[in-house]
Amino acid sequence: MVLTMSAVAEHKQIKVAKLEVHVEPRVEEDHGEMRSHFVSRVDLGPGLDKRERTILFNAARRCEVHKLLSGPISFDFTLAEEAGAA
């Protein structure tokens, strides 16, 4: 999120004093299924007008990592065979 906001700030020529994001991961049970939930607090520091704050906040909410994590996620694991194992 911070890298995305930084790139957008540079592109839009927004001078920022602070870009900081605190993410609290939570695991919750939803109808018998475990679900990951992330609570994010975006700190843009002082000196920005409402438009600049909105632009940067929306950049954080729409970053590529957020897109990856906002849909259903699954993991497939395989164990590589040792070399020479029969």
Image (cartoon, rainbow, N blue to C red):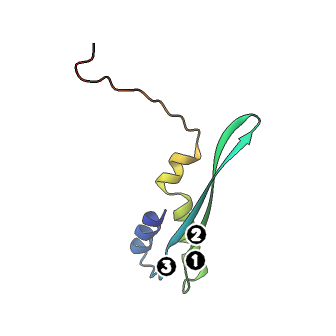
Q: Can you identify the residue that label 2 sits on? A: 42
Residue drawn where x is 56% and y is 66% of the image = 22
- The type of residue carrying mark 2 is Val
Quarter in which the C terminus is drawn: top left
Percent across and percent down for residue 1 are 49, 62
Q: Can you identify the residue that label 1 sits on? A: 51
Q: Earlier in the sequence, mark 1 or mark 3?
A: 3
Give the secondary structure at mark 1: helix
Q: Earlier in the sequence, mark 2 or mark 3?
A: 3
Number of numbered discs on residues: 3
In 3D space, how far apart are the residues under numbered discs 1 and 3 (Cα atoms)? 16 Å
In 3D space, how far apart are the residues under numbered discs 2 and 1 (Cα atoms)? 15 Å
Q: Locate residue 72: give its quadrant.
A: top right
Placement of 79 over or under 4, stated as above or below: above
Q: Can you identify the residue that label 3 sits on? A: 18
Disc 2 to disc 3: CB gap under 8 Å: no
Outermost residue to the top: 86
Give the secondary structure at mark 3: loop
Percent across and percent down for residue 79 are 39, 26
